[in-house]
Amino acid sequence: MNETVDQILERLDASARKVLTPCGSGSLVWRTWGEGQPLVLVHGGSGSWQHWVRNIDAFAAQRQVWCPDTPYYGDSSDPAELGGMAGIAQAFAQGYAQLFNGMPVDAIAFSFGSLVTCETLAIAPGVLDRLILVGAASHGLPRHDIGLQPWKSVEDAQARYALHRDNLHRLMLAHPVDDEGAVRLHVRAVEAGRFNSRRLAFSTRVRDLIGSLRVRQLDAIYGEHDPTAGRDLPALKTLFEAQRPGLRFAVIADAGHWVPYERPEEFMQAVQSHWPDLTDAPEPAGSTD
């Protein structure tokens, strides 16, 4: 029998090894599964490690997967420098240095996590070997008004939940969810978040940074119906390729913004097309040609 979202999350949380790195007066919380070369999965805004609920098992069968909760979100603390991206990036840079100590690390970053990872690489060049941006905003192209509804002033619990559910469908998905656990996941994360990432989604920061980031390969994946991608995916592809020659740009059909959740098999296929060596065992430390 297929597991529900709630069941997968319970199992993953119970089996994870939790590791802490500095973040302000508290900690950046990382969960890890599997063995092999590290693969970091960075969640989106108003989210947590749980954004990767349908992907962790598949990746952990091939790599050592690390899922951090970004500062302000999930179980992580607020950074030392409040209010902007500098503190978030610094906490991540410290975490990469402490956990991986210069070893090759790949990362896949979703939505706001794409901006987080680009900002981290800007202050800590070389901490990642390869990077895939998934549904990255902050590109500066015109976007549709998708009619997200405010919810903070709504006191009735059922009405508030209904607004969250509607917002989830408008922003994140091409089709309604078939598991209410995904809605509960979304509601928990949005209610617990302490940072407004939406204001940064309309900046040009990812576009401005990708050309200068020191990574061996940088690629992008979007859902066909991602409302954060702008009105014209071919135009976004052209823009990114101009900023980053050699960038490979994949579009997953019949998917919205939250591609890793909505189309997990197709998403994995797209990752493997970018990284054919994903399942290769890493060379032992200190090996020579």
Image (cartoon, rainbow, N blue to C red):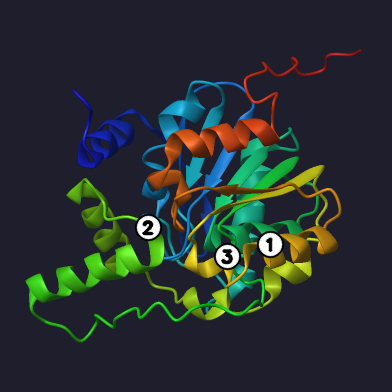
Q: Secondary structure at mark 2?
A: loop
Q: Is residue 196 above or below residue 181?
A: below
Find disc 2 in the rendering and name its residue.
173
Q: Is residue 249 above or below residue 99?
A: below
> Where in the figure is residue 272, as x and y percent of width and height?
62, 30
Q: Residue furthest bottom?
A: 153
Disc 3 to disc 1: CB gap under 8 Å: no
Query: Is residue 35 visible from the viewing direction of this image?
Result: yes
Q: Position of residue 185 (x, y in %)?
A: 27, 53
Q: Nearer the viewer, mark 1 or mark 2?
A: 1
Q: CA distance from mark 2 to mark 3?
A: 27 Å
Q: Is residue 276 left or right of residue 164?
A: right
Q: Considering only order in the chain, which callout, 1 or 3, is on the residue closer to the N terminus?
A: 3
Measured in 3D between alpha carbons, the distance from the residue under mark 1 to the one under mark 2, in whole angstroms, is 20 Å
Residue at label 3? 88
> Which amino acid, by three-letter code, is at mark 2?
Leu
Relative horizontal placement of residue 183, taking residue 284 as reference (left or right)? left
Q: Are marks 1 and 2 in contact (CB under 8 Å)?
A: no
Q: Residues within 10 Å of mark 3 (few under 14, many from 20)?
A: many
The amino acid type, in three-letter code, at marker 1 is Pro
Neighbourhood count class around disc 1 (C-alpha, 10 Å): few under 14, some 14–19, many 20 upward:
few
Determine the secondary structure under disc 1.
helix
Q: Say which element carries label 3.
A: helix
Q: Residues within 10 Å of mark 2 (few under 14, many from 20)?
A: many
- Residue 1 bears which disc, if any? none
| Residue with the mark numbered 1 | 234
Viewer-nearest of discs 2 and 3: 2
Farthest residue, direction right: 289
The count of marks equals 3
Image quarter of residue 157: bottom left
| Picture residue at 68% right of the left edge, 62% below the top | 234
Residue at figure coordinates x 76%, y 40% from the top left: 129
